[in-house]
Amino acid sequence: MTQPTQPAGTATPPNAAPPGSQAAPAQAKQPSPVDFQAVAPAAPEEHVEASCPPPPAPIIINEAQLILAEKRTSLAALRTGIAIVALPMSLTTFLIATSRYYDMDDVLHFLLPVGALNLALLVLGAWLSLRAVRRLRQQEQMLRLLKERHGTLAEFLK
């Protein structure tokens, strides 16, 4: 069986299938190994110590933004804790101001649950506030360490 000849002036790619045979589509799309040699990284000359390179500037800025976002969240929790502490105080003030219009013995069954609810809200608000303050201190320390490591951030974060 003779193979058809190619017209003069046309070159056959090295990985192309001979004319007349059916090649798999995956073979036709695969580049030759020669293509990848131009972009292959050079081999390291000597390996002294395994250390990570410093992160690029956008990663450092993203880390600072993340810490600042956590700080805003802690400030919101602090604000919520203060509001929850203020609620029982204002309710108690209202009950004291209107105490001349009711007899304590007649409304004691209402005042005990309201007092328990006020105490629970006071404890919840104090817990939220203290937790937020503790987290704010941690985030301030993290920002301070980040500024010490990367001096370029120090001029932006005061």
Image (cartoon, grey):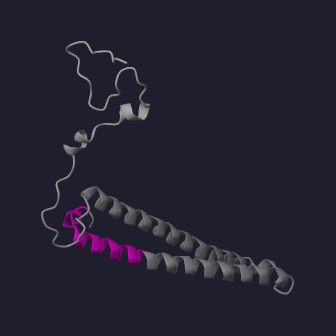
Where's the C terminus, which quadrant?
A: bottom left
Q: Is residue 116 above or below residue 136?
A: below
Q: Residue furthest bottom?
A: 105
Where's the N terminus, which quadrant?
A: top left
Front residue of this view, candidates 112 and 135: 135
Q: Position of residue 90 (x, y in %)?
A: 64, 74
Front residue of this view, candidates 83 and 158: 158
Q: Residue furthest left?
A: 45
At x 30%, y 32%, the residue is: 15
Instruction: Tell me: 23 left or right of 104.
Output: left
Q: Quadrant of residue 5?
A: top left
Q: Residue furthest front?
A: 1
Q: Quadrant of residue 106?
A: bottom right
Q: Any magenta on residue 122?
A: no
Front residue of this view, candidates 116 and 48: 48
At x 36%, y 60%, the residue is: 65
Q: Quadrant of residue 83?
A: bottom right
Q: Any magenta on residue 150?
A: yes
Q: Give the dominant element type of the magenta stretch: helix, strand or loop.
A: helix
Q: Position of residue 102 (x, y in %)?
A: 82, 79
Q: Is residue 125 above or below residue 6?
A: below
Q: Which residues are magenta?
A: 136-156
Number of disc labels: 0
Q: Residue furthest top?
A: 7
Q: Position of residue 29 (x, y in %)?
A: 37, 33
At x 43%, y 31%, the residue is: 24
